Image: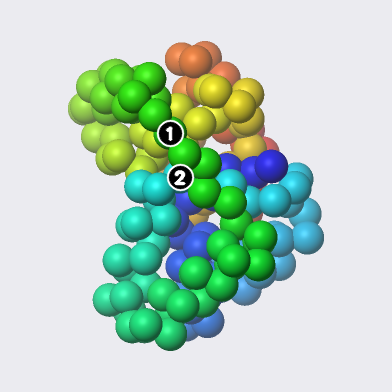
Amino acid sequence: MILTDTGPLIALIDQGEPDHQACVACLPNLSGPMITTWPVFTEAMYLLGEAGGWRAQEALWGMLQKGDLEIVLQGSDHYRRMRALMEKYCDHPMDLADASLVCLAEERRLREIFTLDEGDFRTYRVHGRQTFRLWPGKAT
């Protein structure tokens, strides 16, 4: 499984995105299926709607329906952790989508993330210590 952020979801669908080719080329190298959270999916759905309307949004639904992408449900314990992470990184700041991914990384013991947001995910730490390995970025 690989954590998946908003940027690659948009880039995989929108061929006009500057990172489209890099994200497509990265897919065969990913460790297992892409997983994400509802905050990330919601953000991607909104941005795709703004950029490409229903057809772009439909492509994102298609990734989910084909099993290329899985949304992991998070409960009240996760919400408390997300809030704590956002507070910890408030000077950065951390948004809800990123907090949900870091929380999921901690729960599932995952360190690999498919993201275009290198600046943020080079700053965030899993359990306050471990760095992320970024795709399609360089390994950390």
In this rendered view, identify the residue nearer to me: 30 or 117.
30
In the rendered image, is residue 114 in sight? no
Give the mark nearest the N terminus, 2 or 1: 2
**Which percent across, then down, holds residue 123?**
42, 30
**Where is residue 82, by image quadrant?**
top left
Q: Amino acid at mark 2?
A: Thr
Please tell me whether mark 2 sits on a helix, a strand or a loop.
strand
Q: Which mark is residue 74?
A: 1
* Dot in front, 2 or 1: 1
**Which percent across, then down, holds residue 92?**
26, 32
* The N terminus sits in image quarter: top right
In this rendered view, identify the residue nearer to me: 111 or 18.
111
- Mark 1 crowdedness (10 Å alpha carbons): few <14, some 14-19, many ≥20: few
* Tally of numbered tags: 2
Relative to 39, 92 lies left or right: left
**Which percent across, then down, holds residue 83?**
27, 24
Q: Relative to 131, is 41 above or below?
A: below
**Which percent across, then down, holds residue 57?**
41, 75
Q: Which residue is mark 2?
A: 37
